[in-house]
Amino acid sequence: MSTDGGEPDDPTDEYGEGLADDEERSIEFYGGRWMSALPLAFFVVWAVFQSGVLQIGDTTGLVVGMLIALIVGMLFAKGDWKQYANTIFEGMTQPVAATAIVAWLWAGMFADTLQAGGFVDGLIWAALALNIGAELFPAAAFILAGLLATGIGTGYGTVVAFTTLFFPAGVLLGANPVLTFGAILSGAVFGDNLAPVSDTTIVSAVTQNSDIGGVVSSRFKYAIVAAGIALPAYVVAGNLMGGLDIARQAEGLLAQNSNPLGLIHLLSVAVVIGTAIQGRHIVEAISWGLIVTAILNVITGLASVSDMLVFRAPQNSGIAQSLSFLPFIELVQSAETAVGGSLYTGAAGFFPLIVLTLLIVAGAQILVRGGAFEAMQDLLLGSVATSVRRAELTMVLGTAGVNAMITINTAAEIAIAPYIARIGERFNINGYRRANILDANTSALGYIFPWGGGLLAGYTAMLGLPEQYGWFTQSMLVNPAQVWPFVFHGWLLFFVFIVAAVTGFGLEYTADRETGEVARV
């Protein structure tokens, strides 16, 4: 995810109080502090059963699971349930949730409007012209998604855009859908981890008392090791894993969906990247890209105004008839009235995921107010983190565990950051090292778990493809439970830090280097 690229003096400046603890608003549970983890634990079990066991990729079903989880947790709260209920509202109003929601909405509108303007057709033409076949397409998707995510600083936005645009192009070329989706998620991990303007980067630096430039510089060695293995892995897997062979099933389908004019929207993408690199807020960057896309669509005739926004009004309405000269008004039968267009579909598709995000952050707030995080800290410091190696391994695995429950990566990062700082400071581990452990795991695992925010954002975008393309069928959708083994860069980044913790690779102590020195190396 992303922000405006500035470095706040205090993490509360931009993210509010976050998920900080506050004894005056604590909740007591029957069974002790660990019971405050029940809502999120229940949700994880529900998500594994729904997505993994039953193979049902339904975000609304996950919403129901999280609602039930919050009710189950309330049954174990002591005394008046009012404090429990207030904590749900408190969690849902956290700025960190709004950050993810804004990224999805803006990126969804941008991606769907690019799609309406034939950008996918342009990509197919370019792939054919450059002879990028099905075997190399996943590797190309990984590289390009990584570059976009690094430039604009939003992994979620990158997943939405690439799933909407690159994924159908890959399927049509014959690339394996599951592998292509995994490559897109891997690219998002790479960018979320390295982008200076990414929320995860900023939070990891600020919470560990380190400068952003130094943090980014110091983590490059870890990211490049993982990416250096992931890229050839996608090349090999692309040659071993066959696609759906759509092109041969429908003669002339590639030619029909190939148009070099669609590549004019590379200018729109460049506007977004350039604006973001200048340090402007991601909302501003994507808004400028959206404006340029809309203008290019109309000027070139790639898409009409009504393709982007249309009001389908009843034809028997006198007011509607008088306004029918407007390019965004269509007269239809009364039963067919609606609002439509790429702006509408791009935003509306994420509404279930938005609700799920708010509920998950509410569950995370209960976890904090109930004392489970404090209990985890006491356990780790008292009996597990007894040496530098074990402390770092504890930091890696602890961050992974939190991300399994709090699936919005920035929210998970904010929640666990104080404990990473305390464990690291106890063993004099440098702030850069702590920030890198914190960010790498939250960036990686948020795109791996089938119930993770990044993966669900891509899946939500994918659900709209059958309506966009006549050749794209429901059978081509990738179930979230299928893709997790193929997010190569995410897994490799996680294992790089496991190895680093065990071997001491990249380890620096507080006295080795002061804040700001890494940026000058």
Image (cartoon, rainbow, N blue to C red):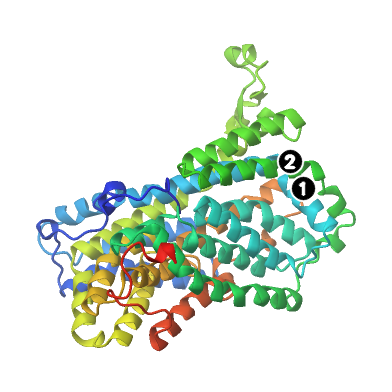
Q: Which of 130 and 513 is in front in this view?
A: 513
Instruction: Specify few, some or many for label 1: CA neighbours under 10 Å numbering under 14, 14-19, or 20 or more.
Output: many
User: Residue type at mark 1?
Assistant: Gly
Q: x and y percent of residue 356 in the render?
A: 40, 55
Q: Nearer the viewer, residue 364 or 228?
A: 228
User: Residue type at mark 2?
Assistant: Ile
Report whether 390 appears left or right of 473: left
Callout 1–callout 2 Cβ contact below 8 Å = yes
Which label belongs to residue 122?
1
Q: How many marks?
A: 2
Q: x and y percent of residue 443 in the render?
A: 45, 65
Up/down of 107 relative to 195, above or below = above
Q: x and y percent of residue 173 in the render?
A: 79, 61
| Res 334 quadrant in image | top right
Where is the N terminus found, in terms of image quarters? Answer: bottom left
| Res 129 quadrant in image | bottom right
Select label 1 or label 2 by which is in front. 2
Q: Nearer the viewer, residue 117 or 483?
A: 117
Ranked by sequence position, the earlier of labels 1 and 2 is 1
Q: Nearer the viewer, residue 28 or 515?
A: 515
Q: Is mark 1 on a helix, strand or loop?
A: helix
Report whether 3 appears left or right of 185: left
Name of the residue lying farthest toward the right: 251
Q: Distance between the residues labelled 1 and 2?
A: 8 Å
Up/down of 67 relative to 312, above or below = below
Q: Residue at x 24, y 76 (%)?
A: 423
Up/down of 71 relative to 497, above or below = above
Question: To which residue does mark 2 refer?
Answer: 264
